[in-house]
Amino acid sequence: MTRYPEIEPHEHGLLDAGDGQLVYWEVCGNPEGKPALAVHGGPGSGCGPGWRRFFNPDKYRIVLFDQRNCGHSRPSAAEPEVDLSANTTRHLIGDMEMLRERLGIERWLLFGGSWGSTLALAYAQAHPSRVSEMVLFSVATTSAREVDWITRDMGRVSPEAWDRFRDHVPEADRDGNLAAAYSRLLHDPDASVRAAAAREWCRWEGTHVATVPGRHPDSRFDDPDFRLVFARLVTHYWAHAGWLDEPLVSGASKLAGIPGVLVHGALDISSPVDVPYRLAKAWPDAELVIMGGAGHGSGDEDTTATLVAALDRFA
């Protein structure tokens, strides 16, 4: 057994976060256990039940939440007229703080991957006294350079797929901010334009993370509503370099005293290893673990086992 058995939440609800936003949350595991918050990726992936299984349910009070406009949170980014102006990193950090206070938690461990690592780092730098430890994987800081890498430089790795990705936007936009160009298409009044842009964005997403043999496309991309939610939120954030006030590596000194484990695949080309490497150098309490045969995500058995072991150690 790599992960813990499936469990169900014993408490859940919708947090009224203001701005017309209802943020879904749930709690499972030991009500008296060590508090931990799972921070999902995307943005827009939602926090599915598989996240619960990384934690020992006898030791942890496990909190999951769906970030604004995705998963069970409302309104959904799939709705044609959804307004994303109240969905920025600052808003998400505020939701996390509101949820912590709602649940009466003093400090919690943060567990996040990919975009979730960005959001966890941003929250911890804003509220370091509220974070006990951090376990992050497929580490990203969503800098403008990282966005350019995925939306442009990865075309050197998958040139045919990237040409298709780039050529889907109007010719006048092809040398500019591709995330912003896609975002405009994803909010077009014509539903067929929105659907086609979501399909092409998610096709590229499935390509740039598939850098290890046997990687299968995310089955959630078969759902047109999920594609639209995911693509709209990713492009909304990437077009603005994660809505971050300062580079997260520059602010890493604020994490002093917070133990961290950074787990990253050596074959994660879409999120290169230099990102967690430079973060670990700037964060004195962080341990960097490079997984030799792994790519992006936590899907391979060795990466999953490493993450579970890190969480067990902090339990």
Image: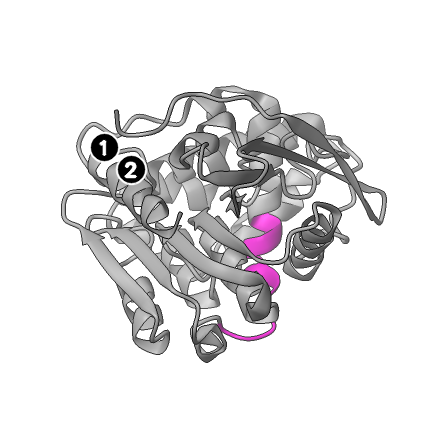
Dot 2, crowdedness within 10 Å: few (<14), some or many (≥20)?
some
The amino acid beneath tag 1 is Glu
Query: Is any atom of residue 166 visible in this view?
Result: yes
Q: Nearer the viewer, residue 178 or 123?
A: 123
Q: Nearer the viewer, residue 292 or 230?
A: 292
Q: Position of residue 202 (x, y in %)?
A: 47, 34
Question: What residue would you read off at disc 2?
Answer: 304
Q: Position of residue 72 (x, y in %)?
A: 67, 29
Q: Position of residue 238 (x, y in %)?
A: 54, 55
Q: Quadrant of the N terminus?
A: top left
Residue 111 - label: none
Q: Residue furthest left?
A: 292
Q: Secondary structure at mark 2?
A: helix
- Which segment is the magenta one? 235-247
At 65% from the left and 58% from the top, the residue drawn is 93
Question: What residue would you read off at disc 1?
Answer: 301
Image marks 1 and 2: residues in contact by CB distance under 8 Å: yes
* Residue 282 magenta: no
